[in-house]
Image: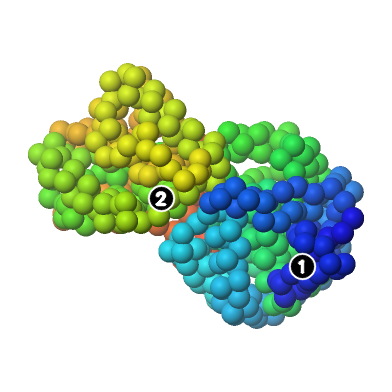
Amino acid sequence: MSTNAFNGTGHDETIDGSDVRIIPLQINGKEITTSTTFDVVDPSNGTVVWRSSSTTKEDVIDAVEAAQAAFPAWSKMKPSKRRDIFLRAAEVLQSRSDEVGAYMMTETGSAAPFVGFNVSTTIEMLRDIAGRIVTISGSVPVCGEEGTSAIVTKEPYGVVLGIAPWNAPYILGFRAVAYALATGNTTILKSPELSPRCFWAIGSVFKEAGLPDGCLNVLAHRTQDAAEITALLIKHPSIKKVNFTGSTAVGRIIAATAGRNLKPCLLELGGKASAIVLSDADLKKAAHSCAIGAFFHSGQVCMATERILVESSIASSFSTHLRGAIDTIFGSSTPTPVLISPAGVSKNQALISDALGKGASITIGDLHAKESSNTRMRPIVVENVTKEMDLYRTESFGPTVSIFTVESEEDAVELANDTEYGLSCAVFTEDLKAGLRIAKQIESGSIHINHMTIHDEPNLPHGGVKMSGFGRFNASQGLEEFLRTKTITWQDG
């Protein structure tokens, strides 16, 4: 079969003149092109842009064995040397920003601002992790028994499996392995089938930075092979921990499989984030933040604003500001936002249609607008949403937001907590005491006062509660997730 492969710098390399590009797997420092492949489509126009190699059972075994073989040396490497590799990785990623950004635009349909946010945040993440690596330490507790001493050490698990989604491929893909690598683990990164070239770039950046072979292995597979390949990876005896970012439905399957094999897991799952707007809020700022929070990256962000809860006394004025913000940022003079697939558009249309059929109304947007492709959809704001409607509880993961009127802080808190999710929330108020008072009552992994619900930075722990998952990425907490403690005692004298 005639193919193109990618060379180590991330550029296409023609093997025998074919126009077909094949993204390789990365196993033990080598790029592996398989005979079985799958198409990768640009969602903005529906064209096949390249193909990806697809992992077999044998590839899984090879990748895990490579990671296991690399573990002894990597786990014993001095923290300062691991730090230097991470700093070089940040430099490499920065130097290749245009290249990796183009991959993300092509595979995910992302607009330039979201791409820039992804790449710059990931560079900062790598630098933040590098600065923390040398700070990892144990403790020397005082034992209760005379003549007994002890130390508590921290050590890596071994081989860690990271599974990340397509929607923010560099932030979520790098973090799926970076915190584990920083603490001395070796890794398998399972790529989503929708953005395998972005994930190939992650492996390529680390390799260029000097990461030893086998420490990071990148696998991709066809959609129909997902269940088998994922289960095979989780069940493998050498896999010691799993982290997964994605939907709650798939997270349940991952957690169940890990549980049956008695393996710990870190899960960051779906969300149904609320933005609460109190009567004293700066309405222009709140409206601008709610518009971006709801529709950034076409709403395909787990922290995206799904509900806006506005005190009744300012509801009319806020709606005017919200309309102005949406017209300015996402109006007809701007390209229609792209979703990853027609299914995302269909899901949002179905949720809105169900709500309209049960008494809701659209205040901003046109459900039946004609677009240039079936993956495009402009923002829609829905009001009069009730508990009987699917939109009330279902994460839309698209450019749809519901607006509710509340009479008090207590009503807002009750409504914000009336969801199975708990990943992010926002509160807009000029009274910090009120904002903090509400924040303490919201069941969510993060609360942002006078900022949109989409807020992720490397020095702040990130994760959810309830059906949004458990465990934390980022900051020192992100490193601790991939370390286990060992107690060592001895008798004095």
- Residue 317: percent from the left, percent from the top? 12, 45
How many angstroms separate mark 2 from mark 1 (CA)? 32 Å
The residue that appears at 75% across and 54% down in the rendered structure is 52
Residue 68, by quadrant, is bottom right
Residue that appears at 12% across and 50% down:
280
Task: Give the side of residue 400 with respect to residue 264, left or right.
Answer: left
Look at the numbered disc 2 and give the secondary structure of its residue: loop
Question: In this figure, which residue is indicated by the disc labeled 2?
Answer: 336
Vertical comparison of 175 with 350: above or below: below
Occupied quadrant, residue 251 = top right
Label 2 or label 1, whichever comes before in sequence order: 1
Front one among 21 and 299: 21
Colour scheme of the rendered structure? rainbow
Image quarter hosting the N terminus: bottom right
- Quarter residue 389 falls in: top left
Residue 204 seen in render: yes
Pick the residue in front: 321 or 305: 321
- Number of marks: 2
Residue at (80% x, 65% y) in the render: 5
**Residue 416 seen:** no
**Residue bearing the label numbered 1:** 6
How would you rate the neighbour count of disc 1 (Cα within 10 Å): few for under 14, some for 14-19, many for 20 or more? many
> Residue 51: horizontal and vertical position, in percent?
74, 54
Percent coordinates x, y for residue 199 in the rendering: 67, 59
Q: Nearer the viewer, residue 407 or 353?
A: 353
- Give the amino acid at mark 2: Thr
